[in-house]
């Protein structure tokens, strides 16, 4: 009974923790510019994320090693330093973008100017990590994140035409601006399949001390949790499509995106949007910061764990503190958070093949997954994803330049 | 007289034959416990480079073995200049991996 | 490689390099960042030491990076104890992890951790 409760909690917190700066901005832009036509991209990206997360969780549960640790161990430092270095760079930018997103949310709520909010926000993120433990962070932040369900509520209230929505799940060629459509498709994938999420999820499996009998929990949380979570993302897109699309508002800022709540929530529109944006970004900021500590510690072999006493994992604590500090400095410079989000999302796509390739090897390595190896379907998926990922990686920068 | 070299700096280096032809890269070495020590008995020389560490992965991803591999005994490899490992025998004397 | 305590043959790169290294009590010491080999004229080369340290990793990237990281280690006051060198004769077991017959306190692998601890203990809530 307790296990079922924990699984349900895991699914709920996955829903609450799904959307953040990247998914909100790409879905909002996608909806505003192409109506429902990019719903299939969110669906496909979610399937990719769920499959990779399930594999990451499975490997960590069986081998008691996170993805980062397994990549160092199996592939050696020479291979690992490239995706590791790239992931850290992207995480710095993405974390700065999430912090910026929280700052924008506070400005929407209070009207008070933006840049200097970044410092207290950084401090609050750090305090939650310093004093928190895995349960508080996972469950607390995830439950708070349920406010993002307001995107689903808004979409529902607008009564979009069901047939039109359903058509959005079928990939199609748009009748205008193909480059921009392609760019947003790739960006949605990059925003959803964040590399930090995979190592974070695998580290979480170790923090939660999952064992092989718990693999069904891993599968349920991955597929159901992320599946339902993607409905929130789709809610953003549908709401944006119905409200902003006809007004031809191209979402160039979060302030413009907030307008999507007006028909559904009236005078509460800005408040609700700000809360949803702020909490979504806050959850992601916690996750990215914590994962920076994980990935550095696991790569270099330092003791790690948010449930460990801080004095017993000093390099881990120092690592996440330094990364947070650097991101706060980037955010305080005042780059536009929406632009930073789109850049980090594009860079995610560039390194995706390097992130996915290890899965292909590790999921077939008996030393890592014992008898829980990938079947032919999973291997086919991974191989296809590596190739498609490589193609996307080649086109994303030109697309960013011409369609971004 | 003995020299100490860094194994991790030698691994991945191109090894050349006695007449300066590139043979492949030093990808792995096998060691055996003798008493209190571990001694290197063989070197694996391959064309696959980094992919060697992927093992099964290469065959799965590429569908074929990337290049041929050789195995050299410890006395067939000269590492006195670790940046330029050399074979001290003919290629024909090497075992195929 | 089959692992049952002391095994006759190992693949050094696959089985030792980049693996976790633990002390005789199972406590984490870091990872095998490098390995030194003693060349003996007329006898097979001998695995000399396991090396642990960021400068060792840095020098695997290239020599300049290695020297730069060494500088950082000196700046942090741990340069004297880096890299941590553990004679291969202390390696007890090579399996999922490399186990040595020393205690972590007998090596310098925890120096940075301990030094940071003196700072971290000043922060409230450091448990």
Image (cartoon, rainbow, N blue to C red):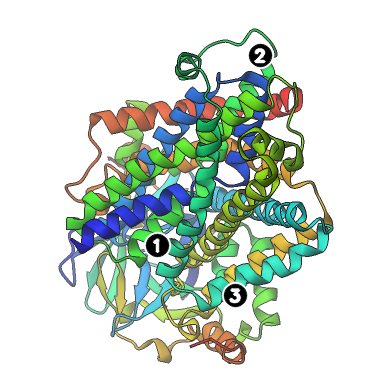
Which x, y percent locates residue C97? Answer: 30, 68
* Secondary structure found at label 2: helix
Tell which tag, 1 or 2, sits nearer the viewer.
2
* Secondary structure found at label 1: loop
Q: Which residue is mark 1?
A: C17
- Front-most of residues B40 and A172: A172
- Front-most of residues A61 and C99: A61
Which x, y percent locates residue C27? Answer: 34, 81
In the visual, does A68 lie left or right of A31?
A: left
Which x, y percent locates residue C79? Answer: 62, 82
Marks 1/3: CA–CA distance? 37 Å
Residue drawn where x is 22% and y is 42% of the image: A373
Residue drawn where x is 38% and y is 51% of the image: A12
In the visual, does C21 lie left or right of A182?
A: left
Whether tag 1 and tag 3 are in contact, CB under 8 A, the answer is no
Q: Residues within 10 Å of mark 3 (few under 14, many from 20)?
A: few
Residue B49 higher or lower than A275, as above or below:
above
Q: Is residue A115 visible?
A: yes
Residue drawn where x is 70% and y is 40% of the image: A258
Chain on which label 3 sits: A
* Image quadrant containing the C terminus of chain A: top right
Q: Which residue is mark 2?
A: A178
User: In terms of image quadrants, where is residue A186?
Assistant: top right
The tag earlier along the polypeptide, 3 or 2, is 3
- Front-most of residues A354 and A289: A289
In the visual, does C15 lie left or right of A45?
A: left
Q: Which residue is mark 3?
A: A127
Chain on which label 2 sits: A
């Amino acid at each position: 009974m307790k296990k079922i409760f924990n699984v349900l909690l895991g699914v709920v917190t996955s829903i609450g923790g799904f959307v953040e700066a990247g998914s909100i901005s790409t879905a909002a832009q996608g909806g505003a510019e192409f109506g429902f036509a990019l719903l299939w991209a969110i669906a496909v990206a979610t399937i990719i994320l769920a499959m990779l997360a399930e594999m990451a969780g499975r490997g960590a549960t069986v081998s008691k090693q996170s993805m980062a640790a397994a990549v160092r161990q199996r592939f050696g430092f020479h291979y690992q330093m490239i995706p590791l270095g790239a992931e850290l760079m992207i995480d710095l930018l993405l974390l700065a973008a999430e912090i910026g997103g929280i700052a924008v949310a506070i400005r929407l709520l209070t009207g008070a100017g933006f840049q200097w909010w970044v410092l207290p926000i950084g401090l609050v993120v750090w305090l939650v990590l310093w004093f928190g433990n895995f349960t508080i962070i996972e469950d607390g932040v995830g439950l708070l994140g349920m406010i993002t369900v307001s995107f689903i509520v808004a979409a529902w209230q607008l009564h979009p035409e069901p047939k039109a929505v359903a058509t959005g799940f079928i990939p199609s060629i748009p009748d205008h601006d193909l480059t921009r459509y392609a760019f947003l498709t790739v960006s949605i994938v990059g925003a959803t399949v964040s590399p930090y999420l995979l190592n974070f999820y695998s580290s979480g499996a170790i923090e939660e001390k999952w064992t092989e009998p718990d693999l069904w929990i891993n599968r349920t949380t991955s597929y159901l949790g992320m599946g339902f979570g993607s409905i929130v993302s789709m809610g953003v897109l549908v709401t944006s499509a119905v409200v902003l699309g006809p007004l031809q508002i191209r979402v160039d800022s979060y302030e413009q995106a907030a307008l999507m709540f007006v028909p559904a929530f009236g005078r509460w529109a800005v408040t609700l949007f700000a809360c949803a944006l702020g909490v979504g970004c806050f959850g992601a900021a916690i996750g990215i910061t914590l994962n920076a500590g994980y990935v550095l510690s696991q790569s270099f072999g330092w003791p790690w764990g948010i449930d460990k006493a801080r004095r017993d994992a000093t390099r881990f604590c120092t690592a996440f503190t330094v990364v947070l500090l650097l991101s706060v400095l980037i955010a305080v410079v005042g780059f536009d958070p929406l632009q930073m989000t789109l850049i980090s999302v594009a860079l995610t796509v560039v390194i995706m093949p390097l992130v996915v390739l290890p899965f292909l090897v590790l999921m077939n390595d008996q030393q890592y997954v014992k008898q829980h190896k990938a079947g032919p379907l999973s291997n086919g998926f991974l191989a296809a994803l590596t190739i498609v990922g490589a193609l996307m990686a080649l086109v994303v920068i030109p697309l960013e330049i011409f369609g971004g | 007289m003995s020299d100490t070299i860094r194994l991790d700096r030698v691994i991945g280096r191109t090894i050349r034959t006695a007449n300066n032809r590139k043979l492949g890269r030093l990808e792995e070495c096998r060691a055996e416990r003798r008493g209190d020590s571990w001694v290197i008995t063989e070197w694996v020389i391959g064309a696959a480079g980094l992919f060697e560490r992927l093992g099964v992965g290469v065959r799965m991803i590429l569908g074929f073995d990337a290049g041929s591999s050789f195995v050299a005994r410890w006395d067939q490899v000269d590492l006195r200049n670790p940046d330029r490992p050399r074979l001290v025998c003919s290629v024909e004397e090497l075992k195929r991996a | 490689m089959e692992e049952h305590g002391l095994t006759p043959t190992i693949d050094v790169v696959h089985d030792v390099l980049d693996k976790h290294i633990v002390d005789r009590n199972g406590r984490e010491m870091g990872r095998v960042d490098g390995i030194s080999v003693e060349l003996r004229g007329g006898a097979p080369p001998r695995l000399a030491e396991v090396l642990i340290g960021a400068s060792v990793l840095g020098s695997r990237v290239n020599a300049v990076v290695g020297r730069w990281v060494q500088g950082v280690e000196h700046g942090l006051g741990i340069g004297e104890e880096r890299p941590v060198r553990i004679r291969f004769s202390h390696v007890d077991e090579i399996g999922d992890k490399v186990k040595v017959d020393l205690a972590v306190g007998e090596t310098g692998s925890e120096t940075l951790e301990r030094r940071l601890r003196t700072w971290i203990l000043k922060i409230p809530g450091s448990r």
